[in-house]
Image (tube, grey):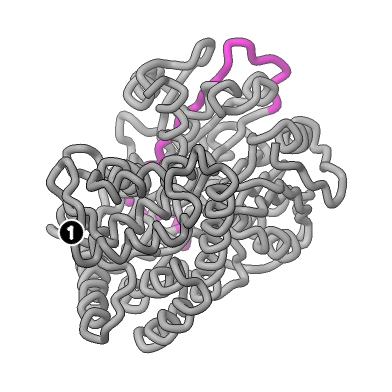
């Protein structure tokens, strides 16, 4: 794999995490609480400042080198464990990276980044985006005018990470059938999810509510102040749109410019959001099958791609192919690979080849797609992406459906969305059992905020396009920018999208009302 491909794969892993709890998880092992710092640790600065240090090792570890002409510095900011008690002694350390171009001029301030998830690392994202337009990174116009600041939200990666799921249990959860049909099969999956929810509550107790989106949004304002910006300039993808929207409601007068790309609709219930994802993935898969029909030379499972994928899932339930590392490519792993491939149009070719290989008895491709999505390392360990995803989603959602309601929705959605509906319904089970407390985010106007740019992609599977106008209208100051493309999130995919977003970030100039950018 060449350098560009490695960068694209790495960026995908943090950019395109699904916003819902889409798969069941197994119980955690061990006990303890998230790591906290005492006041005055040598590597962190008090709230309101950052003690920056050179950290070229971060891009070197992620990519193998630093981007030419870029300077990397890291630091931490201490924030209260609970913003309702800001004076309490115990703090969390929020990890940041600041990336500056050696050609920076006429500096505007900092551009803070969030990749989505919840659970994605903004530190990682900032590194990937620092490599410039040729590798899918940020435009030179942006890196020449802003410090690029990535941060890991509380509970994520380097910032007091939540860890609830042991690697072997993570493997088992991904391998499980995504659509348990019989009542006995469903009950077994429900028991697994109750166990993981109970285990997280036992391990972290009341601290779980510390990891809500509202707490993270208050951290974001502390980060704004710590990097020395009077007002916030922010680029949030996917779940990052929810974080940005929450910030705009809490701190409207502290907003300079927010780009919210791949909108989450905060007014939806948990069940409504999950159904929207099922609809979005089903639509993206249909687009994939049409592409296969029109590009049979690049799609070895044409002309009936839907039939090939459906058949692969069915065979995986009874006679899974053994992968090169000894894992069986069960229906759960095949489904995870399918989900992974739909986040970008470039992933369609990988999916077609993986399914074709699977039919021939080779599971290498499907495991590559699945492991990329799950952030699973070759040694079988995982990042804490899904641990944080589960914790934030369940803490944020006060009215998750109960088990009986989920079972009903599973059967209904299987009819409406044949490949994705049932699995998205079953994915809500952990939150049905959640015992760690709830802290829902606000869903209202950002009164007093300046115009906010909300970007949507018509073929987006994970945050369907319909969410875009809903989020813009909820905020009251949002304006929609549309990309008529495929995949999850838009900026900086085309010149049209890039020019529109750059004009807003640099000069606070909104694009033309109703602008729709073409696919290419």
**Image quadrant containing the N terminus:** top left
Q: Position of residue 247 (x, y in %)?
A: 61, 54
Residue 362's spot in the image, x, y percent? Answer: 24, 44
Q: Residue at x 41, y 67 (%)?
A: 395
Of residue 451 and residue 137, the one placed in the foreground of this image is 137
Which residue is pictured at 70% across the width and 46% down the height? Answer: 255
Residue 89 position, x and y percent, is: 34, 51
Classify mark 1: residues with Cα within 10 Å, few (<14), some (14-19) or many (20+).
Answer: some
Tell me the quarter of the picture where residue 345 sits: top right
Residue at image position (71%, 46%) is 483
* Count of numbered badges drawn on the protein: 1
Q: Is residue 194 left or right of residue 391?
A: left
* 438 up-or-down from 475: above or below: below
Instruction: Reply yes or no: does residue 10 show up in magenta.
Output: no
Does the segment drawn in magenta span residue 95?
yes
- Circle 1 — which element? helix
Is residue 79 visible in this depiction of the protein? no
Q: Is residue 519 above or below residue 117?
A: above
Horizontal side, residue 337 vs residue 48: left or right: left
Give the image location of residue 274, x and y in percent.
49, 69
Q: Which residue: 48% across, 79% down? A: 415
The residue lying toward the viewer, choosing from 18 and 224, is: 18
Q: Is residue 35 visible?
A: yes
Q: Residue furthest right?
A: 512
Quarter in which the C terminus is drawn: top right
Residues in magenta?
83-108
Q: Which residue is mark 1?
A: 169
Task: Name the one closer to the observer, 166 or 407.
Answer: 407
Q: Nearer the viewer, residue 46 or 491?
A: 491
From this view, report whether residue 381 is shown above or below residue 145. Answer: below
């Amino acid at each position: 794999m060449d350098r560009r491909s490695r960068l694209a794969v790495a960026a995908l892993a943090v950019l395109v995490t699904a916003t819902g709890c889409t798969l069941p998880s197994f119980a955690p092992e061990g006990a303890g609480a998230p790591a906290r710092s005492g006041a005055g640790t040598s590597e962190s600065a008090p709230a309101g400042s950052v003690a920056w240090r050179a950290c070229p090792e971060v891009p070197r570890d992620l990519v193998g080198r630093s981007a030419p002409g870029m300077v990397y510095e890291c630091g931490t900011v201490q924030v209260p464990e609970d913003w309702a008690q800001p004076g309490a002694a115990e703090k969390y350390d929020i990890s940041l990276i600041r990336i500056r171009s050696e050609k920076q001029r006429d500096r505007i301030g900092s551009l803070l980044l969030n990749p989505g998830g919840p659970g994605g690392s903004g530190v990682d994202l900032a590194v990937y985006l620092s490599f410039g337009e040729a590798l899918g990174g940020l435009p030179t116009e942006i890196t020449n005018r802003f410090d690029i600041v990535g941060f890991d939200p509380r509970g994520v990666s380097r910032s007091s990470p939540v860890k609830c799921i042991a690697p072997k249990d993570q493997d088992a959860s991904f391998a499980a059938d995504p659509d348990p049909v019989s009542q006995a099969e469903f009950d077994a999956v429900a028991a697994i999810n109750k166990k993981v929810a109970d285990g997280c509550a036992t391990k972290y107790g009341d601290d779980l509510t510390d990891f809500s989106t509202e707490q993270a949004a208050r951290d974001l304002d502390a980060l704004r102040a710590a990097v020395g910006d009077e007002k916030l300039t922010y680029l949030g993808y996917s779940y990052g749109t929810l974080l940005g929207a929450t910030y705009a409601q809490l701190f409207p007068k502290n907003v300079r410019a927010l780009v919210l790309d791949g909108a989450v609709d905060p007014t939806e219930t948990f069940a409504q959001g999950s159904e929207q994802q099922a609809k979005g993935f089903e639509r993206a898969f249909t687009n994939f099958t049409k592409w296969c029909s029109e590009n049979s030379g690049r799609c070895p499972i044409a002309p009936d791609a839907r039939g090939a994928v459906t058949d692969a899932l069915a065979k995986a339930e009874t006679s899974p192919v053994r992968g090169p590392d000894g894992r069986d490519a069960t229906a759960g792993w095949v489904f995870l690979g399918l989900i992974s491939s739909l986040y970008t149009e470039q992933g369609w070719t990988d999916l077609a080849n993986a399914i074709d290989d699977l039919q021939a008895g080779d599971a290498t491709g499907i495991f590559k797609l699945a492991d990329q999505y799950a952030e699973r390392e070759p040694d079988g360990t995982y990042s804490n992406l899904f641990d944080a995803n589960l914790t934030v989603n369940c803490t944020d959602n006060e009215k998750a459906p109960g088990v009986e309601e989920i079972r009903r929705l599973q059967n209904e959605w299987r009819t409406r969305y044949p490949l994705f509906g049932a699995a998205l319904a079953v994915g809500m089970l952990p939150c049905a059992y959640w015992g760690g407390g709830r802290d829902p985010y606000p869903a209202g106007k950002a009164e007093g905020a300046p115009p906010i740019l909300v970007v949507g992609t018509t073929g987006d599977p994970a945050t369907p396009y319909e969410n875009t106008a809903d989020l813009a209208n909820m905020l009251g100051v949002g304006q929609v920018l549309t990309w008529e493309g495929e995949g999850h999130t838009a900026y900086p995919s085309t010149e049209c999208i890039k020019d529109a977003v750059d004009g807003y970030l640099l000069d606070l100039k909104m694009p033309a009302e109703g602008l729709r950018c073409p696919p290419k």
